[in-house]
Image (tube, coloured by chain):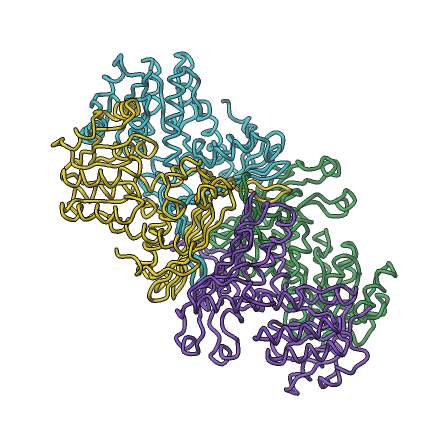
Chain colours: A yellow, B purple, C cyan, D green
């Protein structure tokens, strides 16, 4: 079977997914929709696809799956529409910034028995996946303490911040998902601190640019997350998992692995400076996983519920910062 | 001038300091006191010193300084006695487990104008000191986020736990001092989580063996600390300081720097398995710094106040765990 | 312009090049020829190309370039045929195992003014290319001493050895080209030692499986090469360039960048176990470079002369081993 | 038993050994002799020793052992005198620059049954010793190929070069000994190339500042050595041993293990800039090994024969460079 795709949104991340679909031997990019006509037609012509309206994709009998790369505030509506239209759905995170809206959306997904996968791409990074595999292979024993460092090369523009939902829902949400991916047990509490250290404009918009989070589970496992919107040396993405028998860690990735030595010492070039080059393989593997789930009729992961729980953890972190207390996940009715 | 020393306590750490004093060209180990006569005489004979009572050292006109390596519950009394006797005092941390007792002790130190140095040896580790120097040299700009990982090779016996004051006052206290050493600004809040993951006996004694802490300063700087009483791969001691211009980190130390490669991959031997071998240079540098302060009549660092503040941070962490909230350092009257 | 390709030879390396051509936006795989019909048709159908005879490709007016991936003993003949047919030619190394045959072939290439590029893929590895760029940027000053380590994961089968021309023409030839790429000056002498340490069958075939080579230039620069047909820990490919101002080195590449620590120490997984996965990017960049040369009518590098000189260095190394002496490159009439 | 020492030569290396002797619990520095009276008296007073003439030490009944740190051209005479005087002898390398003179000297040592140890300190470096131990433990299987990189931070002054015996006898000789230490089989051939790349003055003195050497054994094992009198990034000392089952390598040593990251990349400080700080532990372990041999009446290693063979390998390397051929060790009558 070839999985035929409709792509909704031909922007930056849409192009990444289009390329991955085109390169996949069991998938075909059939249709592209975008409010900006030229964006849609450029992408469609590059991969031999049709430019379509969203309605047309919804009704097309020969389209099996959609990839939603439109603005966040359209995600939940589109998921519901395409779930009802019987299409398999891959949606970029988050489903919505509001927990209630996500829940009603997931009710529709459940009722329609639609396949829904949420774009937590990092689970598909070969290095992070190898960490997960090492845990599964018993290399570290029972998982006890996870450390996640996630630092962006630079702060996004103010207009992005405004629509982002804030650092916890925009940036830390990936780390919340990674925490769940690695801890092997659901979060019981979230405790956080957040500051404005990088860009005062971010503070004026009511957001933070630096955050530290501690998650605990019922068994007492910990996950500590360190976030910043600034890392002069590149895109800093590290995880480290300590267990009863040992530790497994994923190192940062570098575009070139050379080292220059002179009187100043030994210098290696900076890390990747952009999430898209850092996570190139993760994006390709992610879509491949979705295609496989659709083709074989299996449940796709990460699911809508995974998206919901990570969002609630982000909400909990924000509440913790504002109220100066540890927030229990049981405070949320998920 | 040669600084003549009396050593109080000829146990494990006493021996370390005795050796450092003996090797120092401007110091002389003159007297050793210990409740166990043989311990005192063995150590005294190894370095050509006299076995004395504490009283004799107190009264000896030719002893300039004492090193206190006796049990914790005797520290404050001994500091007061030797401050009144006009000796310079180096005391192993902590001064006392009770903040009030430390404060009254420091009042005596202040009144007598005694030189008092507290044994936070890690400030003198050449690698951590190089991190501090890099900060001072402007290598990372303004300090913003500090990460400290401190994991012991294994949990101490129950009897040690009982007298230790708990993980925060016994183990994390070093990291609290390191946080202050690196942050460049006093802590405003302490937030912590703690668990029993390593050894249930520790939990039965009312203590924890695993802890995560977030410190914030008034400017919004963060320091995150990760502690565990277990690290199968050796004594894990890392720091990482992020600033406005970059990052500086100190790597773990290894007794042998070899690597073996075969079909299983590339393997380097474990880290040091004991704090005394890991911090050999730190201990020697620490005593050298004290000797220099005494010889030149300068104030010694870390001071009694440094000891007091780190203790209060430990108390704050414990309070945070118990009350599930962020604790302000202003709650303490220091 | 789109460069239209004929592929000669649909084996292992032919597939690699076919994929790179198909993925390149300015190239098109038009025709595939292979003595094994199924190999040709499988590859052709995967990329929408035609199955053709070599003669048909030779005569096809709409084919601009060929990629020669056939057995070594056919390379020189095919280069001559396609040079006369006016096609641009990319040929896998070596052109021939015999220096005289290579020279007559290159005479034809010169007379026909054909574009010929030889497949020394390592020049296009991003890490090795970054080393070259660092040299060009002046990072190490004047190049003085180059060290190349090149160790295969395992020895090839006896039948491969028989046709390979021996370790120097088959394996070290890549390092000879790399030496020229990095030294910035032609080799004046070659001195070598070779042994049979890995597989006695290789010795019985008159070949070696382990070699050490020293190249010198007229200025007295050195390049040392270390080769082995065995590396239990993966495909070991390192270079290190020392100059008057410093050093630049390229590290080994790893498929997954994780590290596991426990009581046995810190272990990273093995290196790539196959040259095709190690040099994936190099192969793609190599073909892209050839396409660009053809499209823009520029000279392609590495050229036929580059292939000839590396072959002569291999011959010199063999002569050095057999005669126990340093061999001058001036002994060869190139 | 306490081993009582006479030190001959109170220069740079003499001080290092004096300190090691003083720190050793079973040794005592009893006497110091030096042509420069102040050098002798300064060192003697620092460790409570007597200033003596060489004759007095020779005749002293209470001196068990001597450490010879005088100029090279006095070594052989002093060894013979003290062998006849019944003292155990530690002598800095080389015994002499002339093979014939070394042989007659060793005849005296043999006749007198004197204990003689030659100062190849690197065998006692904890990291190199760990490499040797890994080999002994079977970690790499049968040793096949050894790589030694040894690069000095900077070239010595001309006057040193004049007396040094040339790069092979002065610098590479340490690597020849290391090759023997690691190969597990005697050298059968030596092939070398040498150049003047660092300092033309060295060339005018008839010496070289850059060298590449290949050693082979009868079994066909290889050892490649790379030497330079310049390394801008510090004292570069690496070894790597490849065997049938894997590889073991010793990394360079750094005085501080920090790393600074910013827009220019990740930078670690330079290596040690001086052999004495790099090999501090090696020197201490070396003397401890000698003391143990004397105290327990055991044979000391490396022996006079070890010194002789390394010297012959140096002579072979020089002959190889001059004659452009592989030199067999059987050409030497050792």
User: Looking at the image, which is closer to me, C258 or C159?
Assistant: C258
Q: Residue lying farthest right? A: D37
Give left or right: position of A300 versus A187: left
- Classify residue D200 by image quadrant: top right
Whether residue D211 is visible here, answered yes or no, is yes
The x, y position of residue B325, in whole percent, is: 44, 63
- Name the residue at 78% across, 71% down: B3
User: Looking at the image, which is closer to me, D267 or B76?
Assistant: B76
Quadrant of the frame with the C terminus of chain D = bottom right
The x, y position of residue A121, in whole percent, is: 32, 44
User: Looking at the image, which is closer to me, C235 or B280?
Assistant: B280
Q: Is residue A160 above or below residue B284?
A: above
Give left or right: position of C124 versus D314: left
The x, y position of residue C85, in whole percent, is: 31, 13
Quadrant of the frame with the N terminus of chain D = bottom right
Give left or right: position of A92 versus C51: right
The x, y position of residue A233, in whole percent, is: 51, 42
Give left or right: position of D185 versus C125: right
Q: Residue lying farthest left? A: A61
User: Looking at the image, which is closer to me, C249 or D290?
Assistant: C249
- Label count reads 0
Q: In this view, does B207 lie above or below A299?
A: below
Whether residue C148 is visible here, answered yes or no, is no
């Amino acid at each position: 079977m070839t999985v035929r795709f409709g792509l909704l949104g031909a922007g930056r991340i849409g192009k990444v997914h289009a390329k991955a679909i085109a390169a996949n031997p069991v998938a075909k990019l059939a249709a592209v929709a975008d409010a900006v006509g030229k964006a849609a037609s450029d992408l469609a012509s590059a991969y031999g696809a049709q430019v379509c309206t969203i309605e047309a994709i919804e009704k097309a009998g020969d389209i099996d799956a959609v990839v939603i790369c439109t603005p966040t505030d359209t995600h939940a509506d589109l998921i519901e529409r395409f779930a009802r239209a019987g299409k398999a759905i891959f949606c970029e995170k988050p489903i919505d910034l509001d927990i209630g809206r996500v829940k009603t959306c997931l009710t529709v997904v459940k009722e329609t028995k639609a396949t829904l996968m949420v774009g937590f791409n990092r689970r598909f990074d070969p290095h992070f996946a190898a960490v997960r595999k090492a845990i599964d292979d018993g290399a570290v024993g029972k998982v006890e303490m996870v450390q996640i460092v996630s630092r962006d090369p630079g702060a996004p523009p103010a207009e992005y911040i405004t629509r982002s939902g804030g650092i916890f829902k925009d940036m830390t949400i990936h780390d919340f998902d990674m925490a769940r991916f690695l801890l092997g047990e659901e979060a019981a509490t979230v405790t956080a601190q957040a500051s404005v250290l990088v860009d005062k404009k971010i503070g004026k918009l009511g957001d933070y640019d630096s955050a530290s989070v501690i998650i605990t589970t019922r068994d007492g496992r910990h996950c500590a997350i360190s976030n910043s919107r600034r890392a002069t040396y590149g895109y800093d993405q590290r995880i480290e998992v300590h267990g009863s028998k040992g530790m497994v860690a994923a190192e940062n990735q570098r575009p070139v692995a050379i080292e220059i030595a002179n009187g100043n010492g030994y210098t290696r070039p900076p890390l990747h400076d952009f999430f898209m080059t850092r996570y190139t393989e993760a994006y390709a593997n992610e879509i491949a996983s979705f295609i496989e789930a659709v083709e074989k009729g299996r449940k796709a992961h990460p699911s809508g519920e995974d998206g919901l729980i990570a969002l609630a953890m982000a909400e909990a972190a924000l509440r913790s910062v504002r109220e100066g207390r540890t927030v229990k996940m049981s405070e949320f009715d998920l």
